Amino acid sequence: SIPLEIFREVVEQAALAISITDAHAHILYCNPAFQRVTGYSTAEIVGRNESVLSYKVTPKLVYESLWAQILRQRAWNGLLVNRRKDGSRYLAELTITPVVGDSGKTSHYLGMHRDVTEVH
Ligand code: FAD
């Protein structure tokens, strides 16, 4: 097995924007790529809900199907219209993975996204 410190360095240096939330989507951690993509520093965003990133134009049905999926402890992939701290809009290709603890309950969610505005 590899040292925990390597896990930390891998997440810190990943090119994808990574965040870890509690079971209610409140942000506990974000990596430097997340801070670059969203414009928020760790101090500004920890404790807030991921919905702070919503541009409020993605149909509600998309969020409902996202939650239906992750509440069943399945990963969700999709596109969301996101808003940076400066108000600018970008298209996020996002994967959310539930993290299931020993109890069988979802303890955290892992979010990984990238800006695909240029691609689409
Ligand atoms: P709301 O009206 O609050 O939610 C819309 C619908 O979603 C609700 O009617 C309900 O069906 C469902 N829903 C919302 N919250 C919950 C909940 N806690 N439990 C069950 N169902 C719920 N959103 C983004 O816009 N951009 C992101 O980059 C993004 N990244 C995320 C990363 C992770 C790891 C997780 C867990 C969530 C992420 N979300 C993201 C989703 C975000 O948490 C919000 O659900 C979403 O932004 C809609 O919020 P709202 O306040 O606009 O709408």
Image: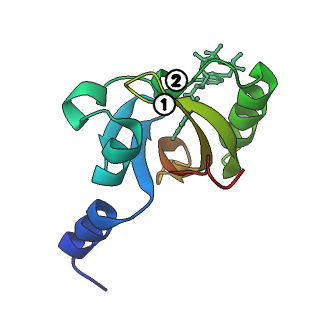
Residue 59 at x, y percent in the picture: 77, 23
Type of amino acid at the residue the image marks with label 1: Ala
Query: Callout 1: helix, strand or loop?
Result: loop
Are circles 2 and 1 on residues that touch, CB within 8 Å? yes
Residue 105 at x, y percent in the picture: 54, 43
Of mark 2 and mark 1, the one earlier in the sequence is: 1
Query: Callout 2: helix, strand or loop?
Result: helix
Type of amino acid at the residue the image marks with label 2: Ser
Q: Nearer the viewer, residue 48 or 116?
A: 116
Q: Quadrant of ligand 1?
A: top right
* Residue 51, disc: 2
Is the CB of mark 1 within 8 Å of ligand 1? yes
* Residue 25, disc: 1
Is the CB of mark 2 within 8 Å of ligand 1? yes
* Residue drawn at 31 percent across, 28 percent down: 45
* Residue drawn at 44 percent across, 24 percent down: 49
Which quarter of the figure has residue 71? top right
Which quarter of the figure has residue 20? top left
* Residue drawn at 50 percent across, 47 percent down: 111
Q: Nearer the viewer, residue 22 or 43?
A: 43
In the picture, the quarter occupied by the N terminus is bottom left
Residue 40 at x, y percent in the picture: 31, 32
Question: Is residue 24 in view?
Answer: no
Residue 117 at x, y percent in the picture: 61, 46
Residue 9 higher or lower than 78, as above or below = below
* Residue drawn at 56 percent across, 31 percent down: 82
Question: Is residue 28 in view?
Answer: yes
